[in-house]
Image (spheres, rainbow, N blue to C red):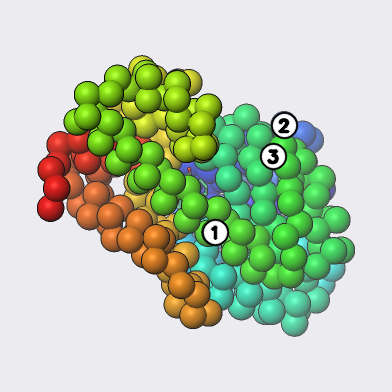
């Protein structure tokens, strides 16, 4: 297939490389990054002209909306536009409506799996859009990832992503504060892990991504909390969850509190540029307020 790939940053670059390795003809554009493995062109429009599918992997919804104007104007009717960025549900739906009006199929397809998953081609795609667009995008998701879940109509992929990451943020905070409490109660961290990871407190954050160094499987905590999944990205995703919750009047008190804590965390030296599990040493250094 002739593919356009816009946004070749930490995630987009390895995803585009996997598409090239699978034999696709990929033209790329990024305002800053260069990627020798794809045919780099000078604009979004130049990348999209004549493409069967355009893929974007951009920082946020405002940038997506700008880039989408150019993508939709340059693609021919019948082409597919897949946005893999994490953005607000409203932007995803607005872009899909604009694409539909131009006869272009649109999918919101945010990912889980991080930079490692992007490089290994093991991302999970959460996809919103109609069946025919999903069927056309599926072979590409199969190259870039190990699973693509069709979640529903436009916006459903972003909805799934922010709900998942709201659980992730809340659970990580719960796991970290439990370790911090256990420390002060004199409970050995390994004993804490051995009990919780096989008891009703188990979770992905405890069992697969343990925030305590030297305990459980290898995780960013074992690498001085280098991300991993940066705390700033958790602030972004929790912010999107609260924006969505406000728009539909949903009660999310834990999500709201998690956002406030992560916002505070990234303002400190303990949090800036660190993995989101570095909340553990941050909380350990505090007493009750
Ligand atoms: P990044 O900042 O590394 O990459 C974004 C790229 O978009 C940059 O290279 C930037 O130059 C480019 N860009 C910005 N404006 C542009 C424009 N107008 N035209 C063309 N290119 C433009 O970010 P990333 O880590 O690759 O994340 C991309 C998206 O994936 C974000 O929405 C993020 O929330 C989401 N995400 C990231 C991770 C992660 O672990 N990094 C995990 C899951 C989802």
Closer mark to the observer between disc 2 and disc 1: 1
Q: Residues within 10 Å of mark 3 (few under 14, many from 20)?
A: many
User: Residue 163, which numbered label?
Assistant: 1
Residue drawn at the location 22% of the way across and 55% of the way down:
264
Q: Nearer the viewer, residue 255 or 42?
A: 255
From the viewer's perspective, is residue 76 above or below residue 285?
below
Q: Nearer the viewer, residue 192 or 166?
A: 192
Q: Answer with mark 2 or mark 3, whichever residue precedes in sequence.
A: 2
Q: Residues within 10 Å of mark 2 (few under 14, many from 20)?
A: few
User: Residue 145, which numbered label?
Assistant: 3
Residue drawn at the location 49% of the way across and 52% of the way down:
167
| Location of residue 59 in the rendering, given as x and y in whole percent from the top left corner | 46, 57
Residue 75 visible within the image: no
From the viewer's perspective, is residue 143 above or below residue 69?
above
Residue drawn at the location 80% of the way across and 49% of the way down:
138
| Location of residue 177 in the rendering, given as x and y in whole percent from the top left corner | 30, 41
Label 2 and label 3: CA atoms lie apart by 14 Å
Mark 3 residue element: strand
Which residue is label 2 attached to?
21
Cβ atoms at labels 2 and 3 below 8 Å apart: no
Label 3 and label 1: CA atoms lie apart by 20 Å
Q: Answer with mark 2 or mark 1, whichever residue precedes in sequence.
A: 2
Q: Answer with mark 3 or mark 1, whichever residue precedes in sequence.
A: 3
Residue drawn at the location 72% of the way across and 31% of the way down:
21
- Side of 208 where 93 appears, left or right: right
Label 2 and label 1: CA atoms lie apart by 33 Å
């Amino acid at each position: 297939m002739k593919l356009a790939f816009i946004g070749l940053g930490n995630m987009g670059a390895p995803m585009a490389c996997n598409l090239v390795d699978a034999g696709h003809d990929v033209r790329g554009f990024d305002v800053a990054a260069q990627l020798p493995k794809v045919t780099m062109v000078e604009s979004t429009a130049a990348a999209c002209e004549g493409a069967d599918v355009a893929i974007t992997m951009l920082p946020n919804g405002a940038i997506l909306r700008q880039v989408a104007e150019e993508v939709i104007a340059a693609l021919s009717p019948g082409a597919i536009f897949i946005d893999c960025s994490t953005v607000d549900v409203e932007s995803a739906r607005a872009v899909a409506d604009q694409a539909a009006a131009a006869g272009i199929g649109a999918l919101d397809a945010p990912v889980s799996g991080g930079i490692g998953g992007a490089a290994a081609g093991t991302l999970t795609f959460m996809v919103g859009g109609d069946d025919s667009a999903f069927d056309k995008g599926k072979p590409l998701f199969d190259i870039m990832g190990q699973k693509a879940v069709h979640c529903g109509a436009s916006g459903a992929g972003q909805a799934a992503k922010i709900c998942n990451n709201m659980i992730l943020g809340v659970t990580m905070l719960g796991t970290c504060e439990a370790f911090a409490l256990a420390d002060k109660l004199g409970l050995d961290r390994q004993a804490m892990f051995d009990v919780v990871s096989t008891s009703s407190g188990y979770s992905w954050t405890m069992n697969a991504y343990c925030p305590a160094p030297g305990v459980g499987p290898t995780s960013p905590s074992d690498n001085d909390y280098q991300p991993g999944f940066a705390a700033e990205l958790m602030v972004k995703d929790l912010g999107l969850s609260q924006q969505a919750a406000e728009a539909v009047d949903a009660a999310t008190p834990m999500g709201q509190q998690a956002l406030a804590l992560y916002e505070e965390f990234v303002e400190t030296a303990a949090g800036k540029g660190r993995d989101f599990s570095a909340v553990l040493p941050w909380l350990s250094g505090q007493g009750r307020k």
